[in-house]
Image: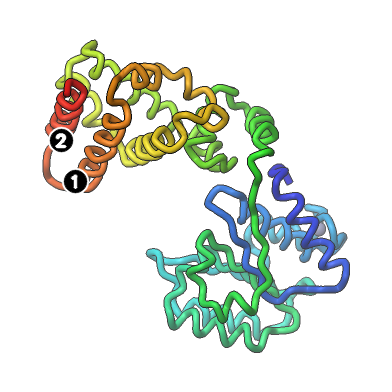
Amino acid sequence: MNEFWLAPVLTRWQSMMAKGIKPQAVVIQGVPGMGKKALTEQVMANMLCSQSDTQACGECQSCRLLNAGHHPDVHRVVAEKDIIKVDQIRQLTTFFASTPHCSQHKLAVIYDAHLMNTSAANALLKVLEEPPATGTLFLLTDAKHRLLPTIRSRCIGLDVTLDQQSESQVVDWLKQLGHEENHIRLALPLVDFVPLAAQSIIANEELNAFLTFLDDLLSVLKNQAHVTQIASQWSEALNMDVLLMWQRWLLLVLKHGNNPSIMGPWQNNEFILWLNSQPQSVDLLITMHDLLMDFVLNFNTQIKRQLMLESMLISLMERKQV
Ligand SMILES: [Zn+2]
């Protein structure tokens, strides 16, 4: 598995299996971007492989069916419009009722398990009260506290985490994926050092778009560019991803602006250097945050985006001069 931080969790799982402890229900918990899905796929592959119990061979019929997404002994439950309904859990019950087709196990995954509505959760509780001998159920979630306590108490828990000491390993891992170190170190604090989230904002060009946005904002604040020009430029290009990144960035600077070990290369960012030269830098950050929140709330309304941007930039300019 490429994600090195998942290895200790996988080892823990393998040692349970080696001792003959096969959990019937597992909650795999971790923030988005920690690799919960990758871990579950690896655990399932190892369980289903007909050649090995510890490391899926990737070549047997079972491995090939799993990789192709057609394994008859695997059932996946995915939320529809952010809800998992009782019918989906009933299908799961039916799936567990039959014997395995081509392996020793019947494995089911519920993604975003905290999205089960009340009747779905109650139906699942019945499954957990009389679990099928061959079955194992994986509940994936980034909000474990939203699962019923009676469900949690019937599952073993696997937490996917990463301590901050691993940062240099994360940087190396992202470099191996072909990203530049400076981008990596700028991305990590914006996503709470979650590796796959950093990988995603770099690969999707979200980080680059945000850096351009900051540059443009700075040229307005320094009177090097005109409000109308920048507002018109951004009225088309600005999307929710950039806005949310701006919000994360503002919170990062407000919370950790004085902590070099968290800020990394952001300390030498032009915008931050300019901000630090301002007498009211904290007030400015808070004003930006308030203006941004107003902007986000009105993002999908009929008000013309360019006008909203102009008014936001003008308010910011006024605030700067106070
Ligand atoms: Zn295999």
Q: Quadrant of the C terminus?
A: top left
* Residue 72 in view (yes/no): no
Quarter residue 308 falls in: top left
- Which tag, 1 or 2, sits closer to the chain's start? 1
Which residue shows up at 42% across the image and 66% down it? 80
The residue that label 1 is drawn on is 298
What secondary structure is marked by label 1? loop
Which residue shows up at 62% across the image and 78% down it? 153
Q: How many numbered discs sit on the rendered protein? A: 2
Q: Amino acid at mark 1?
A: Asn
**168 left or right, relative to 199:** right
Where 299 falls versus 46 (above or below)? above
Q: Quadrant of ligand 1?
A: bottom right
Label 2 near ligand 1 (CB < 8 Å): no
Q: CA distance from mark 1 to mark 2?
A: 9 Å
Between residues 233 and 269, which one lies in front from this camera angle? 269
Q: Amino acid at mark 2?
A: Met
Between residues 253 and 44, which one lies in front from this camera angle? 253
Mark 2 burial class by Cα count in 10 Å: few <14, some 14-19, many 20+: some
Query: What is the x, y in percent for residue 185?
Result: 56, 28
Query: What is the x, y in percent for residue 127?
Result: 60, 84
Between residues 87 and 305, which one lies in front from this camera angle? 305
Mark 1 burial class by Cα count in 10 Å: few <14, some 14-19, many 20+: some
Which residue shows up at 46% across the image and 73% down it? 116
Query: What is the x, y in percent for residue 208?
Result: 43, 26
Say the numbered circle drawn on residue 76: none
**223 left or right, relative to 88:** left
Furthest toward the top, the residue is: 224
Instruction: Tell me whether circle 1 and circle 2 mark residues in contact (CB < 8 Å).
Output: yes
Which residue shows up at 51% across the image and 77% down it? 148
What secondary structure is marked by label 2? helix
The residue that label 2 is drawn on is 308
